[in-house]
Amino acid sequence: MNYLIITAGGKGKRSRLNCNKIFTDLNNRPLIYWTLKIFEDNQIVNKIIISVKKDDIKKINTIIKKHQFKKILTIIEADQSRQESIFTVLKWLKSKADKKDLIGIHNAVNPFVSEKEIRQVYKAAKEYKAALLANLAKDTVKISNEENIVEFTPLRKFSWCAQTPQVANFGDLWEAFIKADEDKFTGTDDTQLLERIGIKARIVPCSYLNFKITYPEDLILASEVLKSFFK
């Protein structure tokens, strides 16, 4: 069984919307509609779990019913942080998923991941224990200290911008999130938690169209991409 957790518990602060940007209008439909449509239409993901703030559950349910999305297994109330929210979903799944089942984790505001990329990242996770989609860095990356002084410059050909889905089997994800909870460690993405238990994810290169809609200018770009992505 291939599951997908869609994290949709944001507040839209960086986009300056003062609301959850999953409901932002894109071509007369909410952003979350386009993300759900991608996974509803593909053959890789069997069941979808959505993590969303309590105040947004009713809106999500309305969208699901209106557009007849069939793969939604449940909606779970999001916690204070993304990591805590995913951990809450994993706790819910513990009695339902086999430890070898693949669990993908995807940002609700990454609506332009392709069917091919979804297939490739799940396949890679099955082979390498964990995998993630990522864009090869276009620019030179600088690593600084706390005072913004450059410490070193990694080779650009080895520098990647992590995207989603990020996929691993349930057993390994459970162990990784348990350890992070015990250590009170907060990571910036899911594969970082896996790294802490010795699992190194396989990078699957993806299109630059698979980007996280975060800032106001991202919404402008998304409206243009939408014109050609869904045909």
Image (tube, grey):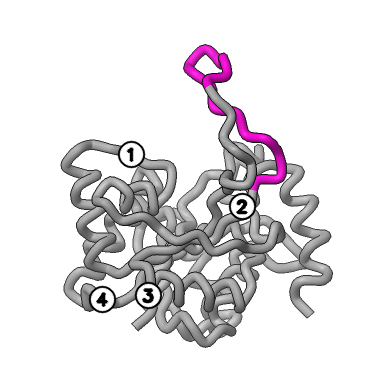
Quarter of the image with the N terminus is bottom left
Circle nearer the viewer, 3 or 2: 3
For residue 152, side relative to residue 96 (left or right): right
Of mark 1 and mark 2, the one earlier in the sequence is: 1
Query: What residue range appears in magenta?
Result: 137-151
- On residue 212, the disc is 2
Q: Amino acid at mark 3?
A: Lys
Label 3 Cα crowd, 10 Å radius (few <14 / some 14-19 / many 20+): some
Q: Which residue is mark 4?
A: 100
Residue 86 image point, x, y percent? 34, 56
Of mark 3 and mark 1, the one earlier in the sequence is: 3
Residue 43 image point, x, y percent? 52, 87
Residue 178 image point, x, y percent? 19, 51
Q: Which residue is mark 1?
A: 186
Question: From the viewer's perspective, is residue 148 above or below residue 60?
Answer: above
Q: Amino acid at mark 1?
A: Thr
Question: From the viewer's perspective, is residue 141 above or below residue 116?
Answer: above
For residue 11, side relative to residue 46 (left or right): right
**Residue at horizontal 38%, vertical 44%?**
81
Q: Nearer the viewer, residue 85 or 131?
A: 131
Of mark 1 and mark 4, the one earlier in the sequence is: 4
Circle nearer the viewer, 3 or 1: 3
Q: Amino acid at mark 2?
A: Lys
Of mark 3 and mark 2, the one earlier in the sequence is: 3
Residue 172 image point, x, y percent? 25, 62
